[in-house]
Amino acid sequence: MKTKVIGVGAVVALSILCFSLPALAQDEVSVQFTGGYTTTWGNSSGDWGAGIYSSTINGQSSPGIVCDDFNDEITSGEKWNAYAYQASTLTSNNIGETLFGTKIGITGYAEVATLVSMMFNSGTSYGGITGITQAELSSAIWDITTTGGISGLDANAQALVAAVEAAFNGNGSKAQTYLATLTNFWVLTPTPQGLGEAQEMWTKGLAVPEGGSPLMYLLLAGASCFAAMLVNFKTRIGRDATV
């Protein structure tokens, strides 16, 4: 009976580990907007900083951050905490943890990721569309994540939105395959999140803090494996004693 109870405990531990994996796919980081941005974009509601914003992450200078959130605002010097999700780890199972995942899904984030990648790589053409500016990339990103879209998109930005949407065409498998290649890009989802909180950002080349989630995963995995071996050992001892 004792061996059976231990066995059930090990199974429960392994189950907890498996269900904990989505939560372990991110690390909490500190983000600060240091006031600079590469361009501006405007519509009837005003002029907005666009392109790549200057920033620090965990107190260290970064390649910059790209905003995908037109609903919230930040000011120079503002600092907030965010969960950092490596783009390559995003799936239909954890996409709801991001700011817009429940609205645009995995395909929407693949579309945004395409434009973010162009932003960081200074891309100016896509699918036959040429002369794309950073302001057009930003406005296209905001149009994808904003319910009903935003007003004031120029012809290039409108064509860009249509082109990336057509590229994935709601195909979650295709979106997943593309995102899996983006090991150098990260989504920084603010915590807490919601209206009035900080904006969701993207960055590249983020160094994962030591002692973060990957280490915790290894510790839990090791503990579960040890428990499984212990159950096996006790079961064999019990059988030998019975014989």
Image: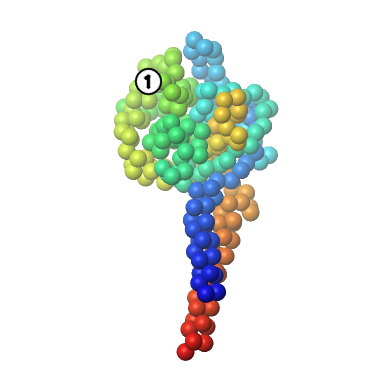
Of residues 108 and 237, the one nearer the viewer is: 237
> In the figure, 221 relative to 78: above or below?
below
Q: Position of residue 174 (x, y in %)?
A: 33, 41
Residue furthest to the front in view is 1
Confirm whether residue 161 shows in the render: yes
Residue drawn at point x = 46 percent, y = 35 percent: 101
Of residues 119 and 12, the one nearer the viewer is: 12
Q: Is residue 56 left or right of residue 233?
A: right
Residue annotated with mark 1? 158
Residue ranking furthest to the bottom: 243
Which residue type carries mark 1?
Answer: Gln
Circle 1 residues within 10 Å: few <14, some 14–19, many ≥20: some
Q: Residue at x 52, y 87 (%)?
A: 241
The one of 15 and 166 positioned closer to us in this rendering = 15
Q: Residue at x 62, y 41 (%)?
A: 29
Identified at 67% across, 28% down, the residue is 78
Residue 201: x %, y % from top left? 54, 33
On the image, the x and y values in percent for residue 184 come to 50, 44
Closer to the camera in the image, 108 or 42: 108
